[in-house]
Image (cartoon, rainbow, N blue to C red):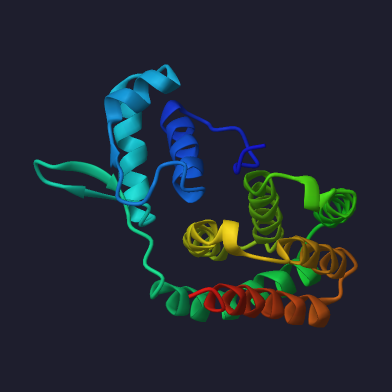
Amino acid sequence: MTIAEQPPASLADLAYVALQDRLIMLDIPPMAPIDDLAVAESLGMGRTPVREALKRLEVDRLVISYPRRGTFATGVDITDLAYISEIRVHLEPLAARRAAETSSEPSRSNLATLADAIEELDVRSMARHDLMHWDLRVHRAIYRAAGNPHLEDTLVRYHNLATRIFCLFLDRITHFDSHIKEHVGLLRSISTGGADEADQLARTHVTNFETAIRALI
């Protein structure tokens, strides 16, 4: 499973999605150098689309470029948790509410199907890496269902940064299964049009995440 829900439209998009996945999941470690030639060869493409992708990822604050030194994965600064959560605690409930109030019937059906799939997961036996992809898939689906592309872009960017922090502590987090299962109630409340409940569940989900991470610091 990959993070992207839609197939990339160009080679640059393909490189962007591939690198984004590796950076978010810390498969490319924080502060690690990124060799655009090696990336291009691994993806079977030229360096130009990879360089275009890296420019987009720099805007997303996932990579940073230094003159004459090259491009590196950004560090993961735990002090950013409060700033990221401050934004998400307002925008995640907004996206959940909008999705519950305005999403189309096919979108609601998709969210209900996603909730069914999560309920059937044997969470305790799954690799944490795979579970994080489920987390990303749920949030991307809700952002898309909210129907506001600017809100979606903003939330994707900040959820990506939150996920990097999550992955940094992944092996130390207990009750990770409960975090994944929280998605079920949220998805069902949106799919049935329960805007107030969706708003509250999304807010609780964000605050629970921050609390779980702070307990490990």
x, y (%) of residue 166?
54, 62
Q: Residue at x 57, y 78 (%)?
A: 215
Q: Residue at x 62, y 64 (%)?
A: 173
Q: Which quadrant: the N terminus?
A: top right
Q: Residue at x 80, y 52 (%)?
A: 123
Q: Residue at x 37, y 47 (%)?
A: 57
- Confirm whether residue 95 shows in the render: yes
Relative to residue 162, is residue 175 drawn left or right?
A: right
Q: For the image shown, how many numbered marks are present on the structure?
A: 0
Query: Quadrant of residue 42 in the image?
Result: top left
Nearest the camera: 69 or 191? 69
Relative to residue 110, is residue 3 drawn left or right?
A: left
Relative to residue 195, is residue 155 drawn left or right?
A: left
- Confirm whether residue 149 shows in the render: no
Q: Is residue 35 above or below residue 199?
A: above
x, y (%) of residue 143?
65, 60
Outermost left residue = 68
Nearest the camera: 103 or 180? 180
x, y (%) of residue 9?
52, 31
Relative to residue 28, is residue 101 drawn left or right?
A: right
Q: Is residue 155 above or below residue 66?
A: below
x, y (%) of residue 96?
72, 70
